[in-house]
Structure formats: structure tokens, C-alpha cells
Amino acid sequence: VDLVGVYMVSKNPAAAAERYRPFEALDAHRFLDVMGLGEAQERFPGVALSAEDNYLLGIKVRVKGLRALREILEQASVPYMADGKLIRIAPEHAGGAMIIFSE
């Protein structure tokens, strides 16, 4: 399991990205994606979004197998959306932040 993405929403994405620039020393710049509400709505249709400023929208995690993950989610009755080679769990079912799984 690897963390491969962190998604944030901001009313001013450029300023927020600059604010988090110190994390570049930790290689966070490779996977930190700060976007405006409109872009978030386009990229993640069907996910309930907040109009608040500067919040964590979700994370992306790489796993070894999506089939096994699907089975676990179904056994636990966790709702998810499958989109090609991705599985998304909406924030309301994942502790307040979306989780995206990929292989």
C-alpha cells in the first residue's frame, strides 16, 4: 500500500499550494494536488463537496489488487464507486475524506 495522492480544495489554489510549499522537502509536491471547488466538482462527480476553504478532499492509495478490495468492501457493506481502474469511497463513508484506490 502506497500513498500516491493528496487532494485539497481551496478558494485560492495557487496561494494554498504556495502555503504548503515547505512540504516539498518531504517530496509531498509530487502528490499534493490543490484545486478550486469547480475543478473538484468536475474531477470528482457525485462526491459531496463543501464550500469551505482549505480542506482535505481525499487521498489516493495504491493497492496490490482491486478485486480483493472490492470483496472486502462488499462484505463490510461499504458503498463505493468503481470507475475503470479506480475505486472511490465517498467522504461520508470514509471518515470525512474521499479515499481513491488504484493498482
Image (spheres, rainbow, N blue to C red):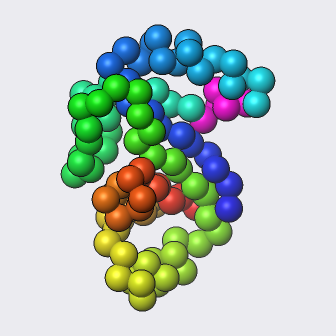
* Residues rendered magenta in the picture: 27-31
For the stretch drawn in magenta, the main secondary structure is helix
Is residue 30 found inside the magenta-colored segment of the image? yes
81 left or right, relative to 16: left
* Position of residue 89 measured from the top left corner of the image (x, y, whole percent): 38, 61
- 84 and 1: which is toward the camera: 1
Is residue 46 found inside the magenta-colored segment of the image? no
Q: Quadrant of residue 20?
A: top right
Please say if 6 is above or below 16.
Answer: below
* Position of residue 94 measured from the top left corner of the image (x, y, whole percent): 41, 61
- In this view, the residue farthest toward the bottom is 75
Q: From the image, which quarter does the N terminus lie in? A: bottom right
Please say if 9 is above or below 46.
Answer: above
- In this view, the residue farthest toward the right is 25
* Position of residue 67 measured from the top left corner of the image (x, y, whole percent): 50, 78
Residue drawn at (64%, 69%) of the image: 64
- 5 and 66: which is toward the camera: 5
* Position of residue 31 measured from the top left corner of the image (x, y, whole percent): 60, 35
